[in-house]
Image (spheres, rainbow, N blue to C red):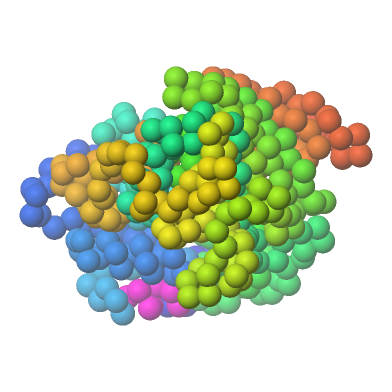
Amino acid sequence: MSRRTNRRQFVKTTAALGAGFWAAGGISPKRSLAANEEIRFACIGVGGKGVEDSDNVGRLGKVVAICDIDGEFLDKAKGRFPDAKTFFDYRKLLDEMHDSIDAVTVTTPDHTHAVISLSAMALGKHVYCQKPMTHSIEEARLMAQRATERNIVTQMGNQGTALESLRRSAALIKAGVIGKPTEVHIWTNRPVWPQGFGTKPKTEATPANIHWDLWLGPAPSHEFSREIHPFKWRGYWAFGTGALGDMACHTLNMSYMALDLNNATSVLADAAEHDKYVYPGASSIEYQFAANALRPAVKMFWYDGGRRPLALLKDCPKQPNEDAGPGDPGKHFTSGALIIGDKGKFYSPGDYGEFEKQSGIIVDGKFTMLGDIVTPVETIKSPGHYEEFANAIRGEGKTVSNFPGYASGLTETVLLGNLAVWARGHRIDWDGKTMGTKLTKVNEKSPDCDASEIARMVRHEYLNGYNIASL
């Protein structure tokens, strides 16, 4: 599949869609599904993580359409779904197939999550979108709003949410096994791609199998590079959300569930130098959360690029030789969460709370494994992250990482940290009601940052005929 989409046809397609479905709100009546009826999926983005997403919904329904800007990815997916119609442009898919699909998966670079998801939601389609849910805070709020208004089933792709170990850990913290929480520490082994000041990708002519203008979508023009597509785009401000955006929806997930870490009042980053083109090679971020009905005021600290709170981990279990996972054998895990309370600490290594033998509470230097904690708590057992989505479409149960009640808030907390990374050395006071910010320079050696730059990160500008306002 080597046909290239030219710019003129690209703009014509956008205009046609804008005058058709989107101008009228684009809402189609959702098909009511019986409990045993087959769900018809369209999968947008079928390479990389898209292989897993499309395969999983494919076993829970029928994949009737597949879309990718990379012809090689599309050809491979066609081998797995021979009956599915193929598209390079998600807008054409939605235009031609809207009466033939019930739900979509969105597994594309972060900067296109919102325009694709909102377009599908405008047609009343249920949406499974990869993490982070969006590239901007405004997008996260709008997607949550639309899901509520249109009664759409949604799920973000932070699959650890379905793990019983994660849910039980969160429930135990809520039940007070470490007393009143005061601090949360989250760290990751990311980035595992080139990132940092001076990183410049090698550019080249766009290969025949790539529809690069469709990959760019609403983003500024950029020459094609194999050091951006298909994976390393995560390190570029225009396309990805850096180490924080890549992993915090996983590694922060348990703590977020346990402590309702919404509506931070301020964020401040100590980040390595960056040029506002690529993310810095390392950063530490301090969040302040005001007290709410569930907990007192807490601080949260995020670390990436090899930074970790090692002084706080001295009495935490290390990774044993026989266990596979992040980190070096016999050394501290290179990703995890530590929640500190006034009666002890809760340790959850890894990204998903999956290391049950090394997860648990530490009181007076004594570790008690998760499975040995006797405090009674109740959790809702998940049938599986993808199964939750499919079941909810059929009217059976609800998704946990849905956009309005969970994923939008988690995504917003994550993206707030990136505002601080951009404005390193400036404390950002956040007004959650208005999405307003106030910058205060706390490190005189840091470069200046204009408030308008932060405003554009909160509310994006969309290029090339794309927009979210009408969706």
Q: Is residue 74 magenta?
A: yes
For residue 196, which quarter of the picture? bottom right
Residue at (32, 31) in percent of width and height: 148
Can residue 264 be seen from the camera position used here?
no
Residue at (84, 30) in percent of width and height: 442
Does residue 209 lie above or below 451 as drawn?
below
For residue 175, which quarter of the picture? top left
Residue at (22, 66) in percent of width and height: 59
Give the magenta part as a residue range.
70-78
In the picture provided, is 212 more to the left or to the right than 312?
left
Overall secondary structure of the magenta section? helix
x and y, in percent, of residue 444 in the image = 91, 34
x and y, in percent, of residue 119 in the image = 38, 44
x and y, in percent, of residue 98 in the image = 26, 50
Does residue 212 lie above or below 457 as drawn?
below
Camera-side residue of 450 and 385: 385
In the picture provided, is 242 more to the left or to the right than 78?
right
Can residue 333 be seen from the camera position used here?
yes
x and y, in percent, of residue 330 in the image = 60, 70
**From the image, which quarter does the C terminus lie in?**
top left
Q: Is residue 309 magenta?
A: no
In the picture provided, is 375 more to the left or to the right than 30?
right
Does residue 1 lie above or below 394 as drawn?
below
Tally of numbered discs: 0
Camera-side residue of 195 and 236: 195
Residue at (58, 72) in percent of width and height: 329
